[in-house]
Amino acid sequence: MRLTVSRKAHFNAAHRLHRKEWSDEKNQLIFGKCNNPNFHGHNYELIVQVTGELDQETGFVMDLKELSDLIKSEVEERFDHKNLNLDVPEFFELIPTAENIAVVIWQLLRPFIPSDKELEIILYETARNFVSFKGEN
């Protein structure tokens, strides 16, 4: 029997969408107000989902306390109250779009999730804008 367990978390972070090799005009055209040179922030909502077989001994797909601790150490402590462009090494050369943030979170968590489990990241940048990532096929 396959089930999905989910853990919700959040972090607050600032970012700027900007490509160094583009002109200021092109960055403004493509990224608009998200290209503000003084950055801007979001209250990100994160849902981490793990899908797998139900362990008959524990009744768990994955221990949610373990998942909670993992999200705290690998995501919240790294991203919360940070400027993603300036404080988080993964974004020194990678534009911190919601899509890229979701992929980075997946990459950070995947090594800690048993290989027989699927991992999906759902990241809300705003209440109406969100992205999901299930990994590479």
Image (tube, helix red, strand yellow):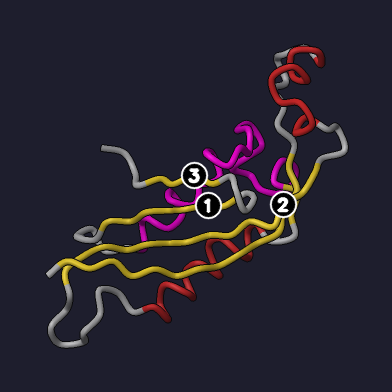
Position of the N terminus, as image quadrant, is bottom left
The amino acid type, in three-letter code, at marker 1 is Leu
Residue 23's quadrant in the figure?
top right
**Would you place residue 121 above or below residue 6 in this image?**
above
Q: Which residue is mark 2?
A: 42
Query: Residue drawn at (42%, 81%), measured in percent from left and top?
Result: 65
- Could you tell me if the residues under marks 1 and 3 are in contact, i.e. CB atoms within 8 Å? yes
Q: CA distance from mark 2 to mark 3?
A: 14 Å
At numbered mark 3, what does the secondary structure look like: helix, strand or loop?
strand
Query: Residue drawn at (71%, 25%), measured in percent from left and top?
Result: 31
Label at residue 123: 1
Q: Residues within 10 Å of mark 3 (few under 14, many from 20)?
A: some
Type of secondary structure dominating the magenta stretch = helix
- Could you tell me if the residues under marks 2 and 3 are in contact, i.e. CB atoms within 8 Å? no
Most extreme residue toward the front is: 128
At numbered mark 2, what does the secondary structure look like: helix, strand or loop?
strand
Q: CA distance from mark 1 to mark 3?
A: 5 Å
The residue closer to the viewer here, 114 or 48, is 48
Q: Earlier in the sequence, mark 2 or mark 3?
A: 2
* Magenta stretch in the rendered image: 84-112
Q: Which residue is mark 3?
A: 131
Side (left or right) of 57 relative to 41? left
Q: Earlier in the sequence, mark 1 or mark 3?
A: 1
Query: Residue drawn at (63%, 33%), measured in percent from left and top?
Result: 95
Query: Residue drawn at (33%, 70%), measured in percent from left and top?
Result: 5
Residue 54: x and y in percent read 17, 75
The amino acid type, in three-letter code, at marker 2 is His
